[in-house]
Image (cartoon, grey):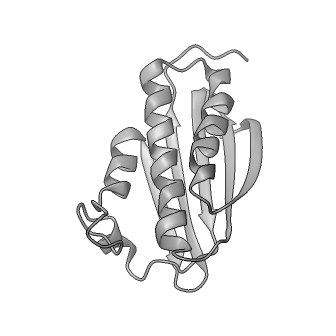
């Protein structure tokens, strides 16, 4: 699909930056005139992906989170959240509802939440290299192009 617009953002893996990332993505998506529900879905999915990078990817260290966004033809938004953290040993297992490596204070529903709010969620990961999550969502709102 043809790219209509795009952005790149790099932030430190600090909890304070999670809300900033949500706002950037939803402001970027506003060009597609999304519904409130679509904005809420995007905010939640991005929040989960960024939080996974902070909590699981970098754990007790600070690294960088790289976010790119693309507005594609046919009113599709594609958001990529990438870290260079610990990586995931078994992506299929990690995407299983209730599975977590974060201890008892984590529900293990991050990927499940992302999948419920996006049309497509793709996860690639390598141990010691990092994880990339790609969220794709069709926006039903009227485009402003």
Where 89 sits versus 96, above or below? below
Could you tell me residue 104's position as x and y percent?
A: 25, 69
Where 86 sits versus 56, above or below? below
Q: Is residue 111 left or right of residue 31?
A: left
Could you tell me residue 141's position as x and y percent?
A: 53, 17
Could you tell me residue 126's position as x and y percent?
A: 53, 81
Q: Quadrant of residue 131?
A: bottom right
Q: Nearer the viewer, residue 12 or 48?
A: 12
Q: Nearer the viewer, residue 12 or 140?
A: 12
Q: Is residue 1 left or right of residue 139?
A: right
Q: Residue at x 23, y 63 (%)?
A: 98
Could you tell me residue 120's position as x and y percent?
A: 44, 47
Q: Is residue 23 left or right of residue 123?
A: right
The quarter in which the C terminus is drawn is top right
Q: Nearer the viewer, residue 115 or 104?
A: 104
Q: Residue at x 75, y 40 (%)?
A: 6
Q: Residue at x 34, y 75 (%)?
A: 101
Give the total number of marks visible in the rendering.
Answer: 0
Q: Nearer the viewer, residue 98 or 4?
A: 98
Residue placed farthest to the left in the image? 98
Residue placed farthest to the bottom in the image? 128
The quarter in which the N terminus is drawn is top right
Where 38 sits versus 85, above or below? above
């Amino acid at each position: 699909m043809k790219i209509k617009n795009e952005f790149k953002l790099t932030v430190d893996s600090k909890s304070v930056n999670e809300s900033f990332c949500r706002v950037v993505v939803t402001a970027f998506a506003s060009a597609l005139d999304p519904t409130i529900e679509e904005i809420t879905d995007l905010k939640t999915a991005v929040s989960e992906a960024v939080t996974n990078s902070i909590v699981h990817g970098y754990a007790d260290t600070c690294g960088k989170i790289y976010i790119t966004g693309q507005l594609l033809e046919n009113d599709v938004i594609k958001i990529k959240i990438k870290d260079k953290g610990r990586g995931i040993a078994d992506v299929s297992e990690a995407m299983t509802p209730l599975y977590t490596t974060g201890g008892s204070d984590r529900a293990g529903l991050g990927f499940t939440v992302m999948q419920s709010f996006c049309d497509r969620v793709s996860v690639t990961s390598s141990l010691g290299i990092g994880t990339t999550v790609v969220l794709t969502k069709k926006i039903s709102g009227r485009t402003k192009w």
